[in-house]
Amino acid sequence: MSQHFYSTQDAGGTGITIMMGYDRPLGHYFLVVERDGTEDPIYTNLRDDGPFHKSLWYYRAKLDELGLAVPSAMYREIERDQKNNIGNRRVLWDKNGIVNVSP
């Protein structure tokens, strides 16, 4: 599974962590949004009806609904993970691009 992390803030200034990626064994994209310091996610695709096999555009719309955004390059990299069947990749992002990548 590839995991791409982006830290941001909500409109009230609370820290938010967004994790998106491609689950290679299950063959689908995923999205989890958490408020920093809490255990219950604000959003996880596992709570959706039919939580699997959604497009990245679906998750982009979910982030828009939450008033959140990630760098556009993050979507391209996650799409690349799917096309190349990449797993076990962890990527940390900042507003300017990739910060750290593990294999």
Image (cartoon, helix red, strand yellow):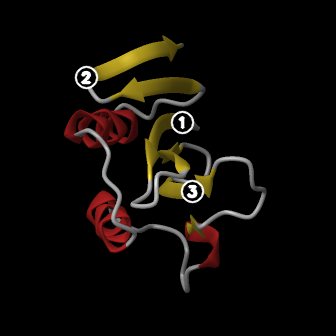
- The residue lying at 57 percent from left, 56 percent from top is 32
Foreground of the two, 14 or 23: 14
**4 lies above or below 46:** above
Label ID, residue 3: 1
Residue 58: x percent and y percent? 32, 69
Q: Are marks 3 and 2 in contact (CB under 8 Å)?
A: no
Which image quadrant: the N terminus?
A: top right
- The residue lying at 56 percent from left, 80 percent from top is 48
**6 lies above or below 25:** above
On the rendered structure, is 57 left or right of 93? left
**4 lies above or below 93:** below
- The residue lying at 57 percent from left, 68 percent from top is 43
- The residue lying at 47 percent from left, 30 percent from top is 86
Foreground of the two, 89 or 13: 13
On the rendered structure, is 44 left or right of 40? left
Q: Distance between the residues labelled 1 and 3?
A: 10 Å
Q: What residue type is labelled 1?
A: Gln
Q: Nearer the viewer, mark 3 or mark 2?
A: 2
On the rendered structure, is 2 left or right of 39? left
Q: How far apart are marks 2 and 1 (CA)?
A: 18 Å
Query: For the view shown, which residue lies furthest in the front direction?
Result: 12
Q: Mark 3 points at which residue?
A: 32
Q: Which amino acid does label 3 sit on?
A: Val
Q: How crowded is mark 1: few (under 14 residues within 10 Å), some or many (20 or more)?
A: many
Query: For the view shown, which residue lies furthest in the bottom direction?
Result: 49
Q: Which type of secondary structure does the marked residue at label 2 adopt?
A: loop
Q: Which amino acid does label 2 sit on?
A: Asn
Label ID, residue 96: 2
Residue 89: x percent and y percent? 54, 24
